[in-house]
Structure formats: C-alpha cells, structure tokens
Amino acid sequence: MYDLIGDIHGHAEELEKLLIHLGYSRSDGGYLHPERKVIFVGDFIDRGEKLAQHKRLLELVMKMVRSGHALAVMGNHEFNALAYHTEHEGGYLRPHIEKNRRQHQAFLNEYDNDPEAKSAVLDFFYELPMWLELDGFRVVHACWDQKSIDILSELVGCEGYLNPDLLVRASTMGTREYDAIETLLKGHEVDLPDGISFQDKDGNERNNVRVKWWNSAAGNLKDLALPEGIELGEAGKISVLRGIPFYDSKAKPCFLGHYWLKGGLVLGAVIGAYLTQAAVEAW
C-alpha cells in the first residue's frame, strides 16, 4: 500500500505533519509506516523562498528512499538543479541568468556555501528514476508519454535513470532527449498564436500552454489549456488534438504532480496531497 505525495517544494515542516497524520513514525531511516510506504512525485526543492527547510526536507527524503521506506521519481526542479550546477563548455547547462537564479534561490540559500552537502544532494537526484511502472499503476512527475519513455529506455534502460551524458543531451534544445524529458518532467506544450501570451505564476511571459493530456474528450484549446482560467480569446476555439500524447483510457492508472489545479483531490494529479492504495484500487 502506498501514499503518494507530490511537489513539496521545501516545506519540510508540512511534510512531517502530513506523515504523522498518515500514521508514520520517526525512525533511523526517516519516517516509517508498519503497512505502507510513500511514493514522492518529485519537486522537492525551490519555492518556499521565505523558509529555510531544504536541508531538513532533503535529509528526511534521502533517508526514506535509501532505507526503502519510500520510492520517488524526479521532478523538473531536480533536473533543473542538476543542469544549473553542471559546468559545460565554459558555462553551465542551465544558464545562471536572473530568472533561473531567482527560481532556484531557496535552494541556493542553504547549499551554496556548503559544497559537500550540495554534492551529496545532487548525487541523490541522479538516483531518482524519471518514471515508475508498478503493479497496477504508474507514476511520473508531469506526463506519461510512451514515445518519450521508449526513447529514453533505449538510452538508459527501462528504469529511466538520468546520467551526466544524458543530462547534457537533454539540456540541448533540438535533441530528441531534450524533447522527451521536457515532456515527462514538464508536460506537453502547445504554442499559442502570434500575439497571444499570458503571465505565469512567477510573472514570466508565456507564449505556450501546457495541456491536459489526460483529457482526450476535449475538443479545443480552451478545454485543454493549463493553467486553468487563462484568457485565450478566440484562440481558445482552436482544435489542437493532433500531436498531444493523450493517455490510453485502457492503460494502468497514472499518478502525477506538477500541475497547479484548483478544487479538491484529483485522482491522477497528486499536488501537495496524498493518495492511498485504496484510491488506486478504486480508480
């Protein structure tokens, strides 16, 4: 039996409260439950800029995963961190521009002056698979796209672990590795028509939208676009079904995180919440 927990983003105190609420108790290997284990759905770091809890959080998560009390997949923020701290051809795979530094600042506040601890955390990120295929269900951070998984499986095996060579190729726009990992860890995106854009939650101007790849019944961009509620005008009437990796309704249930949605607990989108095995069985 499993509890799935997604997108913690540096909130160690809230994670500990949740684990205690779920019946876990502290042990030498992190928190332990007599009958269940956690599956973390990625994005352990960044955000929480007013907190100083990254070290506390990652120490806990690393203990739980390495002791076998939890499983975990990589999120886009873990991938971005590896790229941000990896030198390549005189620079870094993720450039240290203001936008990227600002997004990563909460992590930098605690680790930039502690290279040994930072190195240990980055090593742990390499231990995170990009997807999990388990009995009865699947887990991925943003989008289960079988084509992307097949591409990466050819390179690194069916468990989908990143390595330094793949990190370089996946950080190079235009490569098939880049496209595959962008899809799995960030979601499928559709370009908006010229002149249509919106500001995301961080204030960045966006001229493309992520889509609800789990909603094959949608007929136009308005029904598919994420985040929900953005103003698309006439562009919302565009049919954009071609090329979207819609999930097969006959496939195993797939659980994910990543997306900012509103409302109650959404089966399939685990965002700062938990799902037990009972939810998996009820799918």
Image (cartoon, rainbow, N blue to C red):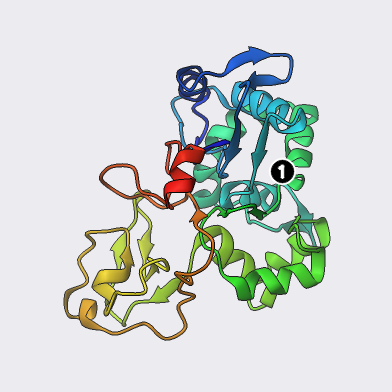
**Quadrant of residue 55 in the image?**
top right
x then y, percent, for residue 240: 35, 82
Helix, strand or loop at label 1? It is helix
Who's the residue at 50% across and 52% down the image? 255
x then y, percent, for residue 260: 36, 49
Who's the residue at 78% across and 59% down the image? 88
Who's the residue at 35% across and 68% down the image? 215
Mark 1 highlights which residue?
125
Residue nearest the observer in this picture, 265 or 96: 265
x then y, percent, for residue 81: 65, 46
Instruction: Mark yes or no: residue 102 visible.
Output: yes
Q: In this view, does 44 lie to the left or right of 69?
A: left
Task: Tell me how many marks there are.
Answer: 1
Instruction: Mark yes or no: residue 179 visible.
Output: no
Who's the residue at 46% across and 31% down the image? 49
In this rendering, the answer to whether 189 lies above or below 50 is: below
Q: Is residue 126 left or right of residue 199?
A: right
Residue nearest the observer in this picture, 144 or 52: 144
x then y, percent, for residue 250: 48, 69
Mark 1 surroundings within 10 Å by alpha-carbon count, few (fewer than 14), some (14 through 19), many (20 or more):
many
Q: Is residue 59 left or right of residue 115?
A: left
Quadrant placement of the N terminus: top right
**Quadrant of residue 224 in the image?**
bottom left
In this rendering, the answer to whether 125 lies above or below 179 is: above
Q: Which amino acid does label 1 sit on?
A: Phe
Q: Which residue lies furthest to the left in this view?
A: 233
**Quadrant of residue 157 in the image?**
bottom right
